[in-house]
C-alpha cells in the first residue's frame, strides 16, 4: 500500500453516508461475488471522463447535458462483470460536486460493481497544486489492484501529471505474477505524443515524470492493455508491445485536442483465452470493434 501524504478532510456526515456504497472496499466485495475462473470468458466496461465542464461557456460550446447518465444507463444493459471509470468524475474535488456525482449514481440505479480511477479534476484543484484527500476519504485508495478471471487489474494514480518512483516500485511488485495484466490510469504517458501531446500548458499530453520508466515496466511485464482518459477523444496506439487505448468520451466537453476522433463513447471489453477485444459504443447507439492488428506510432 502506498503512503498517504495528505490528511483526510472532514466531510459532511451525510456525504459520507451517501458515498459509502460506492467506496472501493464495498465495490470489490460486490465483485468478489461474481468470481470467474482463470480462462473463463467475461467482459467489463470502461467509461472515460464524465465531469460536465467547470464553466458554463465550456458546457454550452463543447458539451450536451445528460451524456454521462445516458452512457452509464446503457452500460447496465450489457453483460459486463464490472465498470471502471477512468477519472474526472467531478469538475473539482469539492464536497458538493461529489454529492452530485453520488446522487447521479443512485439515480441511474447502477447495479454492477463500479470502480474508479482518480483524475486531476477529482483533486482539490484540477490544474496546479492540489491534493486528493476528498477522493480517498470518499472512494478509497487511488492506487490498487484486484484479480478477476485470471487477470490482474491495476489502477494507477497519475492524476498529478506524474508517476513517482514509489509507484513504480509498487507496480513492479504488483506485476510480479503469472496472471494476465491490465492497467487503468487517468493520464496517458506524454512521451507517446498522443492526442495533443504538445499542449504542455494544460498537460493535454498526459504525465511526463517517469513516463518512460512506466512504459518500460509495462512492456517488461507484458501488460496486455493500458486504458487511459484525460484527453476527451478516442484513440489507440501500440508501443513496445503494449496496446494503449484512450477513452475520454464519458460525458466531458469535447474540446479541440488535436484529434478528429472526438465523440462521446464507452467501451465494452471481452476477455477470452485468445486476448482482449474492445467494442466502442457511441452515444447514437452505433458501435464498432477495435481491429486486433498492430497500430504503428507516427514517426
Image (cartoon, rainbow, N blue to C red):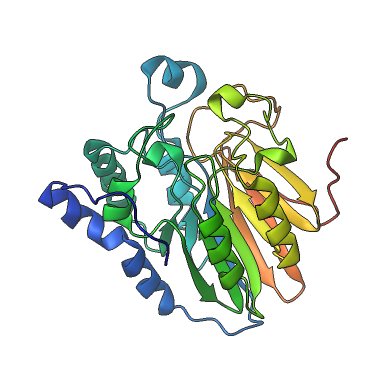
Is any part of residue 55 visible from this angle? Answer: yes
Q: Where is residue 193? Give x, y as percent.
A: 73, 35
Residue at image coords 63%, 81%: 40
Is 256 left, or right, of 297 in this rendering? left
Q: Where is residue 221 in the image (x, y as percent from the top left)?
A: 71, 68
Q: Quadrant of residue 178?
A: bottom right
- Relative to 14, is 202 on the left or the right? right
Q: In this view of the protein, can residue 78 be seen by the observer?
A: no
Kindly identify the residue that appears in the image at 56 percent across and 64 percent down. Answer: 169
Residue 47 location (% of width, % of height) = 52, 49
Horizontal placement of 82 versus 10: left or right? right
In the image, taking residue 82 as reference, residue 188 lies left or right, namely right
Q: Residue at x 58, y 78 (%)?
A: 149
Q: Relative to 144, say whether 58 is above or below.
A: above
In the image, residue 80 sits, relative to residue 138, either above or below, namely below
Residue 170 at what x, y percent from top left?
A: 53, 65
281 or 28, nearer to the observer? 28
Q: Which residue is drawn at 64% across and 68% down?
A: 181
User: Residue 98 falls in which quadrant of the image?
Assistant: top left
Q: In which quarter of the image is the N terminus?
A: bottom left
Depth order, front residue of 90/169: 169
Amino acid at each position: 500500500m502506498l503512503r498517504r501524504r495528505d490528511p483526510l478532510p472532514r466531510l459532511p456526515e451525510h456525504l459520507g453516508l451517501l458515498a459509502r456504497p460506492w467506496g472501493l472496499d464495498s465495490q470489490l466485495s460486490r465483485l468478489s461475488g461474481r468470481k470467474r475462473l482463470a480462462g473463463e470468458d467475461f467482459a467489463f466496461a470502461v467509461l472515460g471522463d464524465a465531469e460536465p465542464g467547470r464553466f458554463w461557456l465550456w458546457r454550452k460550446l463543447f458539451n450536451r447535458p445528460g451524456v454521462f447518465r445516458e452512457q452509464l444507463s446503457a452500460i447496465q444493459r450489457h453483460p459486463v462483470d464490472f465498470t471502471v471509470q477512468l477519472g474526472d468524475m467531478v469538475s473539482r474535488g469539492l464536497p458538493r460536486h461529489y454529492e452530485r456525482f453520488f446522487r447521479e449514481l443512485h439515480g441511474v440505479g447502477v447495479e454492477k460493481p463500479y470502480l474508479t480511477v482518480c483524475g486531476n479534476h477529482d483533486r482539490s484543484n484540477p490544474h496546479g497544486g492540489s491534493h486528493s484527500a476528498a477522493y480517498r476519504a470518499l472512494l478509497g485508495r487511488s492506487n490498487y489492484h484486484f484479480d478477476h478471471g485470471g487477470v490482474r487489474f491495476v489502477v494507477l494514480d497519475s492524476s498529478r501529471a506524474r508517476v513517482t518512483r514509489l509507484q513504480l516500485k509498487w507496480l513492479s511488485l504488483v506485476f510480479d505474477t503469472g496472471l494476465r495484466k491490465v492497467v487503468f490510469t487517468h493520464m496517458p504517458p506524454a512521451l507517446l505524443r498522443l492526442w495533443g501531446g504538445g499542449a504542455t500548458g494544460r498537460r493535454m499530453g498526459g504525465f511526463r515524470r517517469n513516463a518512460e520508466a512506466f512504459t518500460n515496466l509495462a512492456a517488461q511485464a507484458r501488460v496486455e492493455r493500458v486504458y487511459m482518459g484525460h484527453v476527451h477523444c478516442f484513440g489507440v496506439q501500440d508501443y513496445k508491445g503494449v496496446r494503449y487505448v484512450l477513452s475520454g468520451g464519458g460525458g466531458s466537453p469535447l474540446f479541440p485536442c488535436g484529434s478528429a476522433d472526438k465523440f462521446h463513447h464507452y467501451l465494452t471489453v471481452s476477455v477470452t483465452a485468445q486476448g482482449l477485444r474492445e467494442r466502442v459504443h457511441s452515444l447514437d447507439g452505433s458501435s464498432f470493434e477495435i481491429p486486433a492488428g498492430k497500430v504503428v506510432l507516427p514517426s
